[in-house]
Amino acid sequence: MLDTDSARALEESLLDPAVRQSPERLASLIADDFVEFGSSGCIFGKQQVLDGADTLPDIVTPLEGLDVSNLGDDVVLITYRSTTRLAGGSTRDAVRSSLWIHRDGRWQIRFHQGTSASGQQALPAGAPERSATLSGSGAQLKRQDVRRTDWTVGSRVSSSNDRDAIRAFTQANRAVWEASAPLHGAGDGWDDLLLAAGNQGFSVLDDCLTATLTALDVSGRTAVQVGCNNARELLSLASLGAIPALGIDQSAAFLAQAAQLADAAGLSPRLLEADIYDLPEDVGRFDLVLITIGVLNWMPDLERFFRVVRGLMNPGALLVIYETHPILDMFDPQSATPLVPCTSYFDKAPIEVDDLITYDGTDGGKGETGYWFVQTLGEIVTACVSSDMALQRLEEHPHSNREVEYSIYENQVAQLPLCYTLVARATA
């Protein structure tokens, strides 16, 4: 049996940098049959933890709310709340449980589970497990097969039932964004954005996207952004000489924010509330189409999406996509072994989104239910070039344009691609 001080010493020994840097010491604390259930549903064993020791979460000690339950002379359950330091100075909370066993004269951890709890005082009974945060949204996601028929992501839509399924998905995703919009139209961040929009040369575009657009010489081109949100990126195109002509989004609430930003910037793009799969006939054609982080994965039918995008383009017009790399959907940055893949790159099951969407990884609370669709880079490129567009450039980048916790994947010896730029030209 263990008292509270002894149990705390065991649990916190796993967080000690000196122990983590010693494979022998770390291995001695972990049972050979150890199992961890990661927050995304991934399962990890002892060797995976040892292999990822250099990237284990940086958890603050002393641990908060530690409770010890002796389940027998040789079995102890330890529960507590942890705070993990993230890059950039932010933190993330979790509720955790560990099962320790006394075997061969020593205590070893046999089981561990951690569940995200940022902004929560307790995990409600029956609450769903939450997993890693996805691109540009901050939404907490869980992988789940939500198909009712044999319809899968990337399938060719050939029946009214398929079209009804896609409509149901897009309507659900619209509800997610509508519910989340109030989090973004108030507070210091919003006030700062409104103030900045009124400055000459206003731009929120990062160096990578700015360099791409500058090299393409977008000056004088009429521009449309698909999935424009509050239009901050669309309006930023004016700093490069482009003409922000149209922003398309299905959230009326975010477009209301876009109207405020446009007024502050002294610009007057058309702001169109519409399902991208059901655009009005008078939508027009443009010289530049911009798609940025976290748009493609909300699209249940990729081929049809790119056909719609092609319909927005004048002959010779440019499409620029700057997106997170789909390979990152294989990883969980909050797991004990964040560098070990935990899902298949080819898993086509949609991911359920059930929290309000934030941009900084914080917990905005419970929201509507929407769906995130996992695609391979090959599927994205194929859908693009199959829609009467010629691929001009596909560049994968080593930097992350996702939430701050994904920065752990940067500057690795064996570097993953973390985002990409795709440039295509509409054929005549």
Image (tube, grey):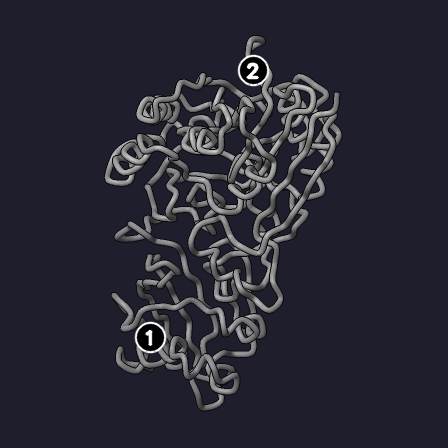
Point 57% across, 70% down: residue: 48
Q: Quadrant of residue 113?
A: bottom left
Element class at badge 1: strand
Query: Residue 93, can we see it?
Result: no
* Position in image of residue 150 (x %, y %): 69, 32
- Residue 20, relative to residue 243: is it above or below? below
Q: Which mark is residue 275?
A: none
Q: Residues within 10 Å of mark 2 (few under 14, many from 20)?
A: some
Read off the residue under disc 2: 279
* Position in image of residue 403 (x %, y %): 44, 50
Which residue type carries mark 1?
Asn
Measure how far apart labels 1 and 2 are at the Cα level: 62 Å
Q: Which mark is residue 70?
A: 1
Element class at badge 2: loop
Which residue type carries mark 2?
Leu
Query: Residue 108, can we see it?
Result: yes
* Position in image of residue 325 (x %, y %): 59, 48
Q: Residues within 10 Å of mark 1 (few under 14, many from 20)?
A: some
Camera-near label (1 vs 2) is 2
Quadrant for the C terminus in the image: top right
Quadrant for the N terminus in the image: bottom left
Indicate which disc, 1 or 2, sits on the residue closer to the N terminus: 1
* Position in image of residue 89 (x %, y %): 33, 60
Point 51% across, 56% down: residue: 332
